[in-house]
Image (spheres, grey):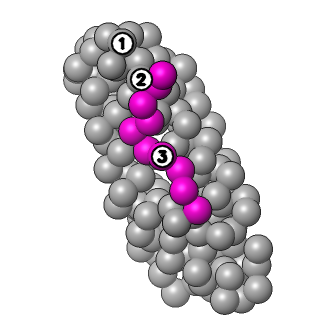
Amino acid sequence: MDAKLIQWTPSLGTGILWQDMQHRTLIDQINALHNAIRAKKGAGQIDPLIAFLDSYVVHHFSIEEKYMDRYRDPEMAHHVAQHTSFAKNLAELKTYRPAQGELAAESLCYDLYEWFKNHILSIDKRLGEFLKAIGEK
Ligand SMILES: [Fe+2]
Ligand SMILES: [Fe+2]
């Protein structure tokens, strides 16, 4: 049986439906990469995961930013800066590929886990609270 690096529970969510659904999609991808690494098949997951992240960065980040803009979120500049930094790191990963093979898979998994802890569980949760206070669901 696969062991999940990140086990979803409602406490991880923001309570905003679209945001939680999209975050869970990313968490599924992180868990799949982690399982592939455990099976020494992580390297083969890098390209499909990068393709997923390319789309995620465009769609998910733009939706969060659209809501921040619509409701004049005072934290918007700081939040968007983190999104921009993630997108820049992704572009650099695609261009330079500083590590190869299983090492690259482990590095990507670590970076995404850090993103989960430091962005999704922090600044995205705050955005969720902000939106719920306005009446969004
Ligand atoms: Fe998010
Ligand atoms: Fe975000």
Query: Are dots 3 and 1 in contact, CB under 8 Å?
Result: no
CA–CA distance between discs 1 and 2?
A: 6 Å
Count of marks placed on residues: 3
The residue most toward the front is 1
For the residue carrying disc 2, how many other residues have a C-alpha within 10 Å: few (<14), some (14-19), or many (20+)?
Answer: some
| Kind of residue at badge 2 | Asn
In magenta stretch: residue 5: yes
Q: Position of residue 134 (x, y in %)?
A: 71, 88
Nearer to me, 92 or 135: 135
Q: Which residue has dot 1 on it? A: 39
Q: Is residue 111 left or right of residue 70?
A: left
**SS assignment at label 2:** helix
Residue 7: assigned label: 3
| Kind of residue at badge 1 | Ala
Query: Residue shown at 58%/51% (left/top)?
Result: 23
Q: Which residue has dot 2 on it? A: 35
Query: Are dots 1 and 2 in contact, CB under 8 Å?
Result: yes
Is 14 located above or below residue 42 in the figure? below
CA–CA distance between discs 3 and 1?
A: 19 Å
For the residue carrying disc 1, how many other residues have a C-alpha within 10 Å: few (<14), some (14-19), or many (20+)?
Answer: few
Residue 10: assigned label: none
Q: Is residue 40 visible?
A: yes
Figure quadrant of residue 123 = bottom left
Is 18 located above or below residue 2 in the figure? below
User: Counting residues from the N terminus, which is met first, the one under dot 3 or under dot 1?
Assistant: 3
